[in-house]
Amino acid sequence: MTEILDLLKKDVIDNMIKSGKREDGRGLDEYRPITLLKGVLNAGPDGSAMARLGKTQVLASVKFTIGAPYPDRPKQGVFITSAEFLPVASPEFESGPPRENAIELARVVDKGIRASEIIDIDSFFVEEGKVLTMFLDIYVLDHDGNLIDAAALASMGAITDTRLPKIEDGEIVWGEYDKPLDYKDVVTTSTFSKVDGKILLDADKNEETDASARMTVSFVKGNICALQKGLEGSFRAEEIEYIINKALEKSKDLKSIVLKA
Amino acid sequence: MNDEIKLPGDVLYDKPVQMPYGYIENGKTYTTVLGIKRKRLIPLKGPYDPKPGDLIIGVVSDVRFSGYNIFVNMPYDVSISSRGIRFDLDYNDIITAKISHVDEVKNITIDDVRRLRKGIVIKVPPVKVPRILGRNNSMISLIKDKTGCDIVVGNNGLVWISFHGNVELAVESIGKVVKEAHIPGLTNRMEQYLNKKKVN
Amino acid sequence: MDYEGPLIKNGKRVDGRAFDDLRQISIKAHVINEADGSAYIKWGNNKILVGVYGPKECLPKHIADPHKAVVRARYNMAPFAGKEGHGRSGPSRRSIEISKVVSDTFQNVILAEQFPRTMIEIFIDVLQSDGGTRCAAVTAASVALADAGIPMKDMVSAVAGGIIEDTLVLDLNYIEDSQGNADLAMAFTHRNKDVLLLQMEGDLPIDKFKELLKMGMDSTEYLYKIQKEALEEGYKNKPTESVVLDL
C-alpha cells in the first residue's frame, strides 16, 4: 500500500544494487519465495496450476479439443501456447489483443516445452483428419516482475496436473478422463536481469524498470533446451557462462517444486 | 473497542447530516464509502479529493517551452506556467505547492511552488494522510525524530522523504501507519516500534 | 456432457438445492496488489476475478464527460473457462453486451459526478464458468468498488432466476440454464431494492415473472451479508494487507 513512485524508482534501485543489496534483502542469485499450486481450476481445464514468485501470480491452464492436424503433419497433434496480461492485474495492461510482451512471454515458454520434447504430440493422433489440440493458456494475474519464470513454472505445474480426456467415436467426452498426460521430464526456466552491471536472478518489477538486459535459460535433463536474450542491453560471454551455470544450479530446486506440488 | 464497519448505503444517522462521505436520502444520512464509524465516519480507502489550502507534493512529468506538467497523483497532471516560479525545473524534480483553487470540474490551480531536494516519493492512500500526520503533527514528528529523515506529507497521498537519515525505516514506519491506521492504540504502538528499531 | 434425467426430483434440484437456495458463495476482497480495489468470487463452480481502477484519466478522450466519471466494465471469459471446448480469446458479442449492461448497472450507483472528466474501469475475468456469471460478477464488482473507496449510494447484488419443469428457481447452474424454460438476470440495490439490471430470455407468464422478481429481491439480504463479510475480513481490527489469491 506504500510504494515508491514509478518516476523515481530508477535512482533508488540503482543506489541499492550498487551496494549489492536488494529491496527485500535477498541475495543477487536468490529467488523470491516460490509457491506452486496444482488443480486450482477443477471444472474448466484438463490441468491447471498457479505459480507465485513473491507477489507475481500467474495461472496456467491446459485444455484439449479435437481439431484438424497441420496438412504437412497429418499424424501429429497440435500444441498452442498463448499468454494474456489481464488488464485486471495491472494499470499498465490494456485490454485487446495480446501485445508484443505477452506474445514474447508465450513464445519463450512454448519454445522450452516444445524443444525439450517432453510431450509426445505424436501420441495425439485420433483418427484420419482428427488430432488432439493441446491449448496451454497463460494468464498473468498479478505482475511484480519476472513473469517468464512464473509463467514457465505455472505451465509445468499445469502440464503435470493434466489428464487426457476420454475419446469416443472420435469425439471428446467432456468431463471424463482417460489417463494422466505422459510427460518425459520437467523443463525448468530461470531468468536473469542485468541491472547497473550486476547480474541478478528473478528481478521484481522495480528492478525490471532499471534492467538493461535480460537472459532466460531453460533446462531439461541437464541440457539447455531454450535461450532467450531480452531488452536492448548486452551481455559479456563470461556473464552468459555465469548465468547458465546458475540456471543449472537452480533447475534442481525448480524441478522438485514442480514434482512435489 | 468493537469498531463497526460501514458499507456504502449503510445508515449513519436517522437525520440529514451534511458531511464528507455522506449521502442524504429521505431525511436520513447514508455512508457512500467503506469506513469505520467512530465519532464520525473514517474512510478506509478512496481517491484524493482536492480542497483549496491543501499542501500537495508533485513530480515534474513534462517540461514544455512555457511551463511544466506536474504529476500530482490525480487523474490529470497539473500544468504550471514558468512565469509563476522563479527557478527552472527539470524532469523528476520534486515540488510542494498549495492548492489555491478547485473549479467545478476538479481542475486545480496551485501556487507557492517550492522545489524539494533529491529524495524519494512514496504513494500512500490519501485517506490515511491525517493518521500519518497525527494529532498536531505528532505522528510525523515522531517518525522524523527517530529516523533523522526530512519528510513532507502531501494531502494528495504523496510523501517525500529526504535521502539523508534512515530512509528504509521511514518508509517502513509510514507503511505500518497506513496498514494499522484503523486499529486503536496506533501512537503507542508506533513509539514502541520505532524505539525498538532504533536500538537494533 | 448432456445431462439426461429430471431436473427436479423429490422437491430437490440436480445438485440437491431447494428452489430458492443459492449455490455456495464466497467472496474475498483486496486480492490484487496493483488494483485500486478488487474482489474474487466463487459462486458454485463459477470463479471470477474483478479489479477496479480509477478514477483515472479518461481514454479514449472523446468519451470523457465534463460532468461525471465514465464507468466502464469489461467482461472477459477465459478461453478455458467453459466445461466444453476451448474458446477464442478476445471479446465476443456476448461479452461486449454483458460489459455494457454491467457498466450501466454501476454508472448511477457510483457518485460519478464527484469525479468529472475521469473514468472508472471495472475489469471482470471469468476463469471458470458454470452459469450465472454476469450476476456473480456484478455482486463481486460491488465489493471491488467498495474496496477501491469509490463513493456509491448503495451496494448492488445480482442473481438469476428461471423456470425449470414449471417450477420457479433461483440461481440456475449450467445444466439448469441450458435446459430450463426461462432465464432472468436481475440486479438490485441493497437498501431500496431498485432494479438496475434486468435481462430475460425464454417463456415467462406475467405472474411468474412477478414472483421470480420477488424471489430475486429477497436474496439481496443474503448476498449483502456475504459482501459485508468479505469487506470486513480485510479491515476489521487487523492490518490491511492484500489477501493472497487462492483460486
Image (cartoon, coloured by chain):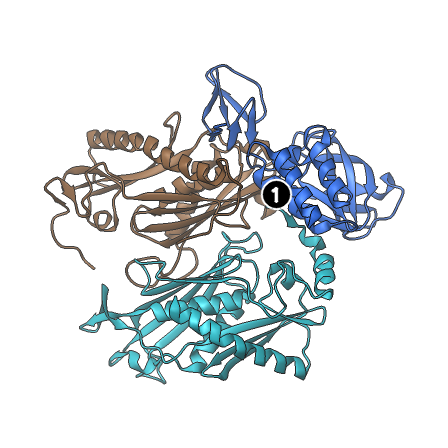
Chain colours: A cyan, B blue, C brown
| Mark 1 lies on residue | B176
Give the residue at x 64% y 42%.
Answer: B193
**Pick the front one: A197 or B102:** A197
The percent coordinates of residue B150 (x first, y second) are 78, 43
Q: Quadrant of the rendered structure where residue C172 is?
A: top left
**Is residue A160 at all visible to an observer of this figure?**
yes
* Res A135 seen here: no
Question: Could you tell whether C65 is left or right of C83 in the image?
Answer: right
Left or right of B180 on screen, residue A174: left
Residue B12, percent from left and from top: 49, 22
Pointer 1 indicates a residue of which chain?
B
Note whether B51 is above or below A99 in the view shown. Answer: above
Report the front residue among A171 and B55.
B55
Is residue B25 found left or right of A119 in the rendered image? right
Which quadrant of the figure contains the C terminus of chain A? bottom left
Please give left or right for residue A73 compared with residue B124 in the image.
left
Kindly identify the amino acid type of the residue bearing the numbered disc 1: Lys
Q: In the rendering, at what x and y percent does residue B135 appear?
A: 68, 28
Residue C133 to residue A175: above or below: above
Count of numbered marks: 1
Q: Residue C158, how many percent across, how many down? A: 35, 38
> Quadrant of residue A62 in the image?
bottom left
